[in-house]
Image (tube, rainbow, N blue to C red):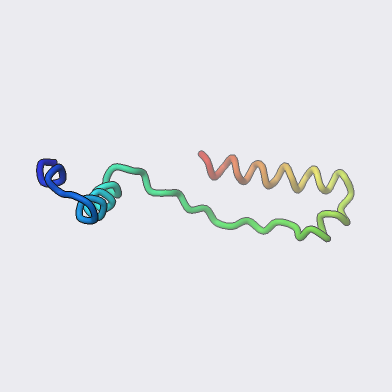
Amino acid sequence: MNQLKDMEGKDFVQNYIILMQYVLPKPATAPVKEVPELEEFIAMTPEERQLAIEEIQESLNNEKS
């Protein structure tokens, strides 16, 4: 910490960024789920659309857990 306090400008920023990786959580990566194309979605019945939306929501909720 003392060495970091003594740094200025570019050196301080570079070292601060390097140290941040040890403090901040890594962003989670999630697999991309296949979703209907717009034309396909429009062609669906209201029930099919609702089911597709629910599947996407469930998938997103599972990724957060």
User: x and y percent of residue 59 in the render?
Assistant: 62, 46
Give the number of marks: 0
Q: Going 65% across and 42% down the picture, which residue do you hit?
A: 58
User: x and y percent of residue 63 in the render?
Assistant: 54, 45
Q: Quadrant of residue 32?
A: bottom right
| Relative side of 39 to 62, left or right | right
Residue lying farthest front?
9
User: x and y percent of residue 20 in the render?
Assistant: 28, 47
Q: Nearer the viewer, residue 64 or 27?
A: 27
Q: Going 83% across and 60% down the picture, which residue do you hit?
A: 39
| Relative side of 51 to 27, left or right | right
| Relative side of 25 to 46, left or right | left
| Relative side of 49 to 15, left or right | right
Q: Going 87% across and 45% down the picture, which residue do you hit?
A: 46
Q: Is residue 18 above or below residue 53?
A: below
* Quarter of the image with the N terminus in it: top left
Q: Nearer the viewer, residue 51 or 25?
A: 25
Q: Quadrant of residue 6?
A: top left
